[in-house]
Image (cartoon, helix red, strand yellow):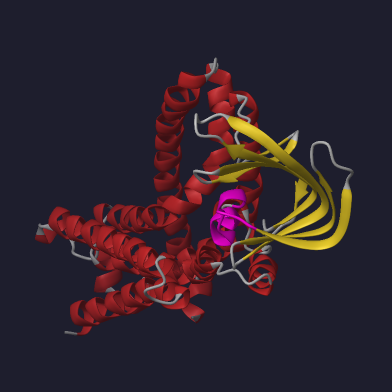
Amino acid sequence: MGFLFTGLGRYLFLRTLSGFGIALAAVAASILLVDVVEQLRTVGSRTDLSLWQALGLTALKTPMLIEQTLPFVVLAGAMIGLVQLNRRSELIALRASGVSAWRFLAPTAAAALLIGVFATTVLNPIGARLYERFESIQARIEGENQSDVVTRNGVWLRQGDATSQTVIHAESIDQNSTTLRKVTFFVFEVREDGALSFVNRINAEEAVLRPSSMWELRSLVWARPGEPPVAEPVVSIPTTLEANALFDTFVTPGSLSFWRLPAFIGAAKSAGLAPTRYELKYQSLLALPLLLVAMASLGAVFSLRLQRLGGLAGYVTMGIAGGFVLYFSGQLAAAFAVTEVVPPQIAAWAPALTGFFASLAILSFVEDG
C-alpha cells in the first residue's frame, strides 16, 4: 500500500480519477438527455409540463441515477485511464521498469474504493432526499389525488369486495406505513344494481393494519344513520389490504438514505412486516465499495494488453462484456432476494465478491502465469 503514497502512485491515482471523471460526464449527459425526454413523454402527456420543469425534475433524480450507474462509470473510467497510459507508452515504461501490475493497479482499486465509500455515505443520502422531493413535486404537478398516495389533504385509501366498499381517510401515516392517525372509515354496501349505499362511518384516533389482514381501530366512534354514536376503545375489522403491500406503496427504497435504513428496517420488523426490499437496499449499499473495486479491477485487467501487440480493442470489449455480466447477475440475485428465494445479504454481497475474486484470478493468470 506504500506505493500509493509515492509520486508514481499519486500520478496513477489522479489518472484513474481523470478516467472516472470522463466516464461520469458522459453518463450524466446521457441521463439528462434521456430523462428529460422521458419526463416530457410521461408527465407531459398528462399535464402541461414545460421544458424547465422537466429539467428540474431530472435534476432531482440525477444523483440517484448516477448512483445506480456508478458500476459502469467505474468500469469505463478504469479502462479509459489505462488506455490513455497505453497510448502514451507510459504503460510500456512501467512494464519495462519492472513495476508489477499488482502495484500499478492498486491506485485504480483505491480510487474505486474511495468513490464507493463516498457514494454510500454521501451521494446516497443526498440522492434519497432529492428523490423524495422529486416524487412530491411530480405528484403536485400531475395533480393526482389517488386513493393510495399521501397528498396535502392527507392519506386516501380504498378497500372492498363485491359486496362492500370502504373509503379511508387519515390525516397522517407513520414511517412504517401501517399506522394511520386521525382516521375516518366510510363504509358502503354494494347493491344489486351496482350502486353504493352508505352504511356507517367510523372515526378513530388510530388504525393499525395488522399482518393478519385486520384493521385494529383504537378510541373510535361508530356513527350509523338514524342511531346515536357509539364509542368503543378497540375494534378489529377485516380488510382486503395487505400490510406489506401498503408498506411498499407508501415508502420506496429509493427515498430512504443509507443512514435511515437500519432504523426503518428495525421498526418494520417490530411491526411484524417483512422489509426484504429495504434490507436488500441496505446490504447493496454496504457492498457497493467492494462492487466498484471489482468493476475497476475487471476493467483494468482487460486493459493491460500493450497497444503495440494489437488486439487491445478485443480485450476492452471482453472487459465491458464481463462488467455487464457482473452487473446483470447482481440484478438477477436481487430479483431472487425480493421473491425471498435467497437472503438479501447473499444477493447483495455475492456479485461483488464474485467479481472481485474473478478479477484477482484473471490478473494472477495474466501477470504471473
Relative side of 31 to 56, left or right = left
- Frontmost residue, 258 versus 210: 210
- Frontmost residue, 275 versus 365: 275
Q: Position of residue 123 (x, y in %)?
A: 60, 54
Q: Position of residue 290 (x, y in %)?
A: 45, 72
Q: Quadrant of the C terminus?
A: bottom left
Q: Residue at x 50, y 21 (%)?
A: 46
Q: Position of residue 268 (x, y in %)?
A: 65, 68
- Frontmost residue, 156 versus 66: 156
Q: Residue at x 55, y 15 (%)?
A: 48
Q: Position of residue 35 (x, y in %)?
A: 44, 33
- Frontmost residue, 78 versus 61: 61
- The magenta stretch spans residue 243: yes
Count of labels in the image: 0
- The magenta stretch spans residue 249: yes
Quarter holding residue 146: top right
- Camera sees residue 7: no
Q: Residue at x 43, y 65 (%)?
A: 338
* Residue placed furthest toward the left: 310
Q: Is residue 50 above or below residue 346?
A: above
Task: State the extent of the magenta-drawn residues as a range.
Answer: 238-251
Q: Residue at x 62, y 25 (%)?
A: 143
